[in-house]
């Protein structure tokens, strides 16, 4: 049997990865529902391209998705609720969007969690500026994960398993407490952009959130617009819900609204000057 | 630290939702295989549109998928088998399709489980009529689940967990109870993502389930020409404990063949026995 195996090597697992399996056990939502969508993002991408040609500034596409997500959640807050014990539900007024932002310092890149607080009260440009300013900040040691948490997760079995059960129990009792994701990670999340480059490709992840978007690839594909076949930019987008707090039908209605916002180019200021146009836009009541 | 969280409210969880996490625990651990398909449904959608223009009657598209599913399962019943203990397999003769149907109750929409019994012996129109009559029927209490079942799921921990484990053990010894409640196969409601490509992934308690996603108009290739077609995003879920990859793939192929060819689409005035319209 053994001679059938090719050559192999046993290498040291990097310290930074050793707690990963336990960490994933700790955070994972048990009953995830997934939606794999294809969203026409031509309008938003064209706006970003035109803006770049005019000003030289590259607007954050992740920022735009964050903006649309926050708006859609704002209209239907039940999708970002969390169970508190067995008989209660916690509903949040604000949409805090957690995301991983790659920071670039001295030529090295490091991913680091960031929360866009109250994203439902922010404009696309404000979210974009927040992301860009975080990208140039230094990375704190341990990527912001408290070192005691990492030490406990690295203890020999069965201590981490016990600790995980304890923390999961605490989270269930109070999702707004220290064991919950909301305090440090936001109420919903968006994964980093450009996962698969210029191809269709959906990502799948375990998540601690009640609602999360995974931004996949953006591919140029033929699509039908007004009965004509045209090249369009189609984004592969994964939406993850927690079935414990939301059913299939309301989840589908939420997805419909989110796609509508993204495809229509909701909230994109049409031309210069952005700031004043934006103020006009904000003064209008929300489109239903 | 805490002030970073915005304002929040703690509300009572509606009692209809309280048993959900425990209910999901009962079947969420199974060994699922998923297939994500893109199916050309232009023929069926055209038939439904023409039928509407002729008679004003909107035929149920979910009903058509349930009809094709029942036919495909009827030809290959191993996909709807259930484990009975460790040494036996339960194979059902009839295809009972469980599907949630949204009903309007006092202006509110509420999903309610319904089972199309013996769907493999029914025509598309019969299934359609059954779905429409359920949609207008009254809503039974507790979404059709027996009230003792919901009561046990709502018991305090660890009793609810013990009950879940017990239900699993009973299911394993005799799957007929859960099949009687949920059908042998399942289809979720249509139009989940509207006119967009979009697949839904969710496990079912049944051995075989379809998640009906969005229907998008997309360019497709017909006889070497690019034409606009209606493409359905369809997810097929199997229980790997009872079916292997290869037979599952063959089943999917046959199911797609039936749907794409418009199997069994005949007007009521020219109705034939279902077996006479099987495509070659």
Image: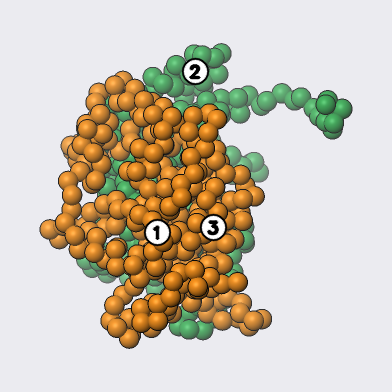
Chain colours: A green, B orange
What's the distance in space between the residues labelled 2 and 3, CA to CA? Answer: 50 Å
Mark 3 crowdedness (10 Å alpha carbons): few <14, some 14-19, many ≥20: few
| Disc marking residue A279 | none
Regarding mark 1 in the picture, which secondary structure is present there?
helix
**Does residue A171 sit above or below B140 in this rendering?**
above
| Disc marking residue A160 | 2
Mark 2 crowdedness (10 Å alpha carbons): few <14, some 14-19, many ≥20: many
Residue A27, image x, y percentages: 44, 32
**Does residue B112 sit above or below A28 in this rendering?**
below
Query: Foreground: A273 or B255?
Result: B255
**Callout 2: chain:** A
Residue A253, image x, y percentages: 32, 59
Work out whether residue A39 can be spotted. no
Query: Foreground: A17 or B41?
Result: B41
Regarding mark 2 in the picture, which secondary structure is present there?
helix
Between disc 2 and disc 3, the foreground one is: 3
Q: Which residue is mark 3?
A: B75
What's the distance in space between the residues labelled 2 and 1, CA to CA? Answer: 50 Å
Image quadrant in which the N terminus of chain A is located: top right
């Amino acid at each position: 049997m053994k001679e059938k195996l090719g050559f192999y090597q046993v290498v040291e697992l990097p310290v930074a990865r050793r707690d990963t399996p336990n960490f994933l056990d700790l955070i994972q939502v048990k009953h995830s529902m997934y939606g794999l969508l294809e969203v026409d993002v031509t309008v938003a991408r064209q706006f970003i391209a035109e803006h770049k040609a005019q000003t030289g500034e590259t607007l954050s596409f992740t920022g735009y998705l964050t903006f649309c997500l926050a708006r859609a959640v704002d209209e239907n807050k039940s999708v970002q609720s969390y169970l508190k014990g067995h008989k209660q539900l916690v509903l949040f007024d604000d949409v805090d969007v957690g995301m991983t932002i790659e920071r670039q310092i001295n030529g090295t890149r490091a991913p680091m969690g960031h929360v866009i607080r109250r994203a439902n009260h922010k404009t696309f440009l404000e979210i974009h500026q927040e992301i860009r300013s975080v990208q140039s900040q230094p990375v704190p040691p341990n990527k912001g994960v408290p070192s005691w948490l990492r030490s406990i997760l690295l203890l020999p079995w069965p201590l981490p398993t016990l600790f995980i059960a304890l923390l999961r129990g605490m989270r269930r009792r109070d999702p707004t407490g220290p064991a919950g994701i909301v305090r440090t990670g936001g109420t919903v999340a968006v994964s980093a952009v450009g996962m698969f480059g210029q191809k269709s490709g959906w990502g799948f992840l375990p998540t601690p959130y009640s609602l999360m978007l995974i931004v996949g690839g953006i591919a140029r594909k033929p699509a039908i617009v007004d009965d004509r076949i045209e090249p369009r930019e189609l984004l592969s987008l994964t939406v993850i819900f927690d079935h414990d707090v939301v059913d299939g039908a309301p989840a589908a209605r939420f997805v419909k609204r989110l796609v509508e916002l993204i495809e229509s180019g909701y909230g994109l200021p049409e031309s210069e000057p952005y700031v004043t146009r934006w103020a006009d836009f904000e003064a209008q009541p929300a489109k239903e | 630290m805490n002030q970073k969280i915005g304002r929040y409210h703690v509300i009572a969880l509606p009692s209809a939702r309280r048993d959900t996490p425990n209910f999901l625990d009962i079947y969420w651990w199974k060994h699922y295989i998923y297939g994500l398909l893109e199916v050309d449904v232009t023929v069926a959608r055209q038939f439904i549109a023409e039928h509407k223009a002729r008679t004003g009657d909107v035929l149920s598209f979910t009903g058509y998928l349930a009809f094709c599913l029942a036919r495909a399962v009827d030809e290959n019943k191993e996909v709807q088998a259930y484990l009975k203990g460790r040494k036996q397999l339960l194979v059902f003769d009839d295809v009972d399709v469980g599907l949630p149907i949204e009903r309007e109750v006092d202006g509110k929409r509420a999903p309610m489980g319904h089972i199309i019994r013996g769907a493999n012996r029914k025509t598309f129109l019969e299934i359609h009529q059954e779905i429409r009559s359920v949609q207008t029927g009254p809503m039974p209490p507790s979404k059709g689940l027996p009230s003792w079942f919901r009561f046990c799921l709502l018991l305090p921990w660890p009793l609810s967990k013990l009950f879940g484990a017990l239900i699993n053990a009973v299911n394993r010894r005799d799957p007929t109870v859960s099949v009687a409640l949920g059908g042998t196969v399942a289809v979720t409601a249509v139009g989940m993502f509207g006119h967009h490509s979009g697949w839904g992934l969710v496990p079912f308690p049944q051995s075989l389930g379809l998640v009906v996603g969005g229907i998008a108009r997309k360019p497709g290739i017909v006889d070497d020409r690019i034409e606009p077609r209606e493409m359905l995003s369809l997810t097929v879920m199997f229980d790997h404990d009872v079916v292997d990859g290869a037979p599952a793939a063959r089943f999917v192929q046959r199911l797609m063949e039936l749907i794409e060819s418009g199997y069994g689409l005949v007007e009521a005035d020219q109705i034939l026995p279902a077996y006479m319209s099987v495509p070659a």
